[in-house]
Image (tube, coloured by chain):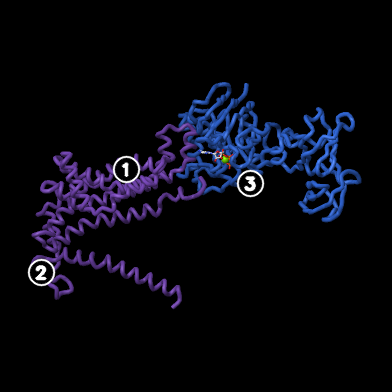
Chain colours: A blue, B purple
Amino acid sequence: MTAIRIQGLTKTFDGFTALSDIDLDVAPGEFVTLLGPSGCGKTTLLKVISGFLEPTEGKIFIEGSDVTAIPPERRDTALCFQSYALFPHLTVRQNLEFGLRQKKLPRSDRDERVKDVSQKLDLAAQMDKLPNQLSGGQQQRVSLGRALVMRPKVILFDEPLSNLDAKLRDQVRIEIRRIQRDYGLTAIYVTHDQSEALAMSDRVVLLNSGRIEQVDTPETLYHRPRTRFAADFIGNSNVFTGQVLGEDSPGRWNIETPAGIFTCALEDAPHGKEVALCWRPEHAVIGETGIEARVLNRAFQGHFTDLACAAGNGEFRVQALETTAREGDVIRIHVPPDRIRLLEDRP
Amino acid sequence: MTREQLNKALLILLLVICTIWLVIPFGMAILWSLVDPSEPWTADRLLPPAMSFWRWRDMWENSSLQVAMATSYTLAPLAALLSLALATPTAYALGRIAFPGRELAKLLCLLPLVVPGFVTAIFFTSLLFQLGLHTWRFGAILFAHAVLALPYAIRIMTVSFEQVRQDHIDAARDLGATPLARFRVAFLPALRPGIFATLLIVFIQSIEEFAIAFILGSPDVVTIPTLLFSALGQDYVRPNAAVLSLILVVPNVILMLILERLLKSANPTLASGKG
Ligand SMILES: Nc1ncnc2c1ncn2[C@@H]1O[C@H](COP(=O)(O)OP(=O)(O)OP(=O)(O)O)[C@@H](O)[C@H]1O
Ligand SMILES: [Mg+2]
């Protein structure tokens, strides 16, 4: 059974389509990330799942039952707000207890759950403080705790880490994942930070202006982007349009691009003559063979060096672990055939 | 003179003016209220020749002061509550519901304030007479006071409703709160300073209001201002008027101080960005 099923979901705001035709199944205990640029509809989708927005079309199921018409207060979802939304006049303990009191849980159960969560989130020493007496990371944890004590079927996060500094973000990211696993929660996590999405998720849902672009595991999404948008949005990519010249040897196809001829390993013959292909800058090998390219710019990045190169009428980027190439040098680069992918969208 | 010195000098000047402004009328009122009837305070003397609380005692025992105070201090809190109750739904709409023409509606709510009080009083009371509301004089004054304070009440409550954060309401809802619990946890803390401010301002307005109380109330219902104005009329006795004006003004000063405190401390926990 699926924990969450989204079926043919469309949401329009007086004429403006924020989400169109979204289909998604999330398995129990799965951690799914909604990733996409600002304004692509991530928050809108989260609000539809939590019940704050009514879909224009389509249905939402939680554990098999249709919840489309159920208001947020009666949906078994808990939302972690980007702004934390802690009640400023209530102490940490009262904030954590708030949802349980609404559920009219007996005192002993309440105390036990709050204690459990406060220990897991390392908040035991802050229980009698007010939210504005806490650091940003602590407030974030209280907001997480307030959702966790509810032991919801589904927990939803709206960019919960965007207000934290980089170091704290890494730490809380790990905590969120550990707790989600410990409690066996199904989680949907919104972010526009691709590294966060790749690091945390079981699966990533890539959204582009209200549509699902690709749903895959982080590895597949990174190594096998299906569209130019996916290739560009996740990591760096060199994308070219080219002409298929023909099959070189079985499964090896030559494609001519403005930057030169690339040989790609393809399982199926390409559809048509015009194709778009992409490869990652770190997969290029600098050596004795391959395309001749002139280095336009060199940027040392610590663990690698970023080279901007020009070859023929094309430009691309190459990342090398160690290189002595300087601006103006001519180098030869080779991209292994199995590292080159054809994109689905038409050039 | 440097800029700093100039600033300092201007500040001192302002303080002096304010002090004079407050101290002279107050001091004069206090001195006049203490004039003993045995010897009048003539212009050639700096201080009253004989001072006693005789006037205070006399006014307390021999005028309608006790009745007037009872009336005024029942009227004002009731008017404050009624005005708050009447203003809240409108303020909610203006502060939390987006609709075309909202800014215009906000402005229209303030418009009554440009009409001089006496003019409003005369025509508003004639309206009440036509409606037949004047038969219950106290009720008519109460209603009028509550309605005429609405611009202030609506304005303050609108701003308060705008302060309520949508994410707090949503969070409460997401955690399963009923509408009542939502109100208590998300609305009330943000509204509280506004509620107090509204109550105090309407209270003070009602305590000080003369025209309507006079037109609707006389001769049966006497409030402190109507009593004061009658003491300013034909049988004007300055020491008696001084006693009345002090009685009128002292509670207001205290309330204003409370109000100022309230607005200053307007819930510091809400001021923080996060949380
Ligand atoms: N209540 C609304 N009325 C009209 N348009 C809206 C409303 N809410 C969202 N939108 C529009 O829907 C689109 C998607 O908004 P949404 O908030 O879901 O974006 P997002 O992906 O969460 O972006 P961000 O990363 O900036 O938070 C935006 O173009 C936005 O302008
Ligand atoms: Mg968003």
Q: Name which residue type carries label 1.
A: Ala
Q: Position of residue A304 (x, y in %)?
A: 79, 49
Q: Residues within 10 Å of mark 1 (few under 14, many from 20)?
A: many
Say which of A110 and A54 sits in front: A54
**Share a chain, discs 3 and 2?**
no
Q: Position of residue A5 (x, y in %)?
A: 60, 25
Which residue is tagged 3?
A168
Q: Residues within 10 Å of mark 3 (few under 14, many from 20)?
A: few
Q: Quadrant of the N terminus of chain B?
A: bottom left
Pinpoint the chain carrying mark 1: B
Task: Residue at 67%, 41% (x, y): give it.
Answer: A194
Reading the chain from its start, which is encountered first: label 1 or label 2?
Answer: 2
Which residue is tagged 2?
B40
Residue B241, quarter of the rendered image: bottom left
Q: Position of residue B166 (x, y in %)?
A: 47, 41
Give the SS element for disc 2.
loop
Q: Is residue B188 visible?
A: yes
Task: Residue at 40%, 41% (x, y): give it.
Answer: B188
